[in-house]
Amino acid sequence: MFKVLAKTKTLPGKSEDFKEKITALAPKTRSYPGCVSYQVLQSSEDENVFWMVEEWDNEVAFAEHFNAPFTKEFEKQIDGVVDGDVEPYICNFVVQL
């Protein structure tokens, strides 16, 4: 199992639009085979910064979910909403309590 921390920043004035779109995406991603958990966090310091915190069974499932129709549709929907690309960070557990 591994975690993914994915950071994205919205364009000014687009944070509410992003929240609406990511809220629709979240249950679809969470129900995708291999997804153990999926959370979306918004920075308390900058309303335009968001983190997706995901836990996956394996890297194959994580990679495959990018080909799912709902993921491709989401990517189209956030064009003009986010500032640049989503930055994923693949993380391995060091300590888990």
Image (tube, rainbow, N blue to C red):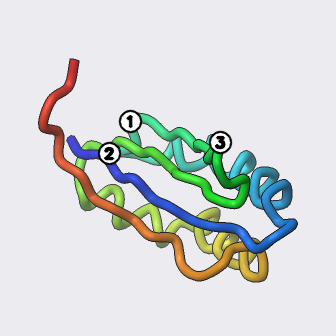
Q: Disc 1 on helix, strand or loop?
A: strand
Residue 51, how many percent across, how many down? 53, 52
Three-letter amino acid code at the position of disc 3 = Ser
Q: Which residue is mark 3?
A: 44
Q: Residue at x 62, y 58 (%)?
A: 49
Q: Disc 3 on helix, strand or loop?
A: loop
Q: Residue at x 50, y 61 (%)?
A: 7
Mark 3: give few (<14), some (14-19) or many (20+) Cα within 10 Å: few
**Tag 3–tag 1 contact (CB < 8 Å):** no
Residue at mark 3 to residue at mark 2: CA–CA distance:
26 Å
Relative height, residue 53 to residue 47 (above, below) = above
Q: Earlier in the sequence, mark 3 or mark 2?
A: 3
Q: Which residue is mark 1?
A: 36
The image shows a total of numbered marks equal to 3
Mark 2: give few (<14), some (14-19) or many (20+) Cα within 10 Å: many
Residue at mark 3 to residue at mark 1: CA–CA distance:
26 Å
Relative height, residue 48 to residue 56 (above, below) = below
> Quadrant location of residue 78?
bottom right
Residue 66, how many percent across, how many down? 47, 69
The numbered mark at residue 56 is: 2
**Tag 2–tag 1 contact (CB < 8 Å):** yes
Residue 90, how many percent across, how many down? 27, 58
